[in-house]
Amino acid sequence: MEFIEKAIETTATINAQRQLVLDEPLPFSGPARVRVIVFMPEETDIDEKEWLRAASRNPAFDFLKKPEEDIYTLADGRPFHDQR
């Protein structure tokens, strides 16, 4: 038996019971079995404080805690003043 697949894009909400509730009725009647692919929206970028907190706890950055890596002082460089 050969199946002809037809894709329909719609939006939905996942409710508190983890059920998918469609925003609009489907353009065909059932009962019928369907395949469902759920695309979750990407998380927004994490804010700077959260990123710094994660980086400070990540062992990949432990080398920065070594005294030989502490090469800058407050006297280094020049102040930056944003001209916006």
Image (cartoon, grey):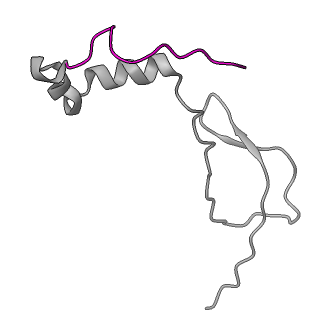
In this figure, what is the number of numbered marks? 0
80 w.r.t. 38: above or below = above
53 w.r.t. 46: above or below = above
Q: Name the foreground residue: 57 vs 39.
A: 57
Q: Name the foreground residue: 52 vs 79.
A: 79
67 w.r.t. 15: above or below = above
Residue at 61% x, 31% y is: 17
Report whether 70 appears left or right of 20.
left
Quadrant occupied by the C terminus: top right
- Going by the picture, which residue comes out furthest to the bottom? 1
Residue 68, quarter of picture: top left
Report whether 68 appears left or right of 30.
left
Residue at 22% x, 29% y is: 61
Q: Position of residue 48 (x, y in %)?
A: 49, 21
Residue at 25% x, 27% y is: 58
Q: Position of residue 23 (x, y in %)?
A: 83, 44
Residue 1, quarter of picture: bottom right
Residue at 21% x, 33% y is: 60
Is 76 magenta? The answer is: yes
Q: Name the foreground residue: 4 vs 48.
A: 48
Q: Position of residue 26 (x, y in %)?
A: 84, 58
Q: Main secondary structure of the magenta part?
A: loop
Is 37 magenta? The answer is: no
Span highlighted in magenta in the image: 71-84
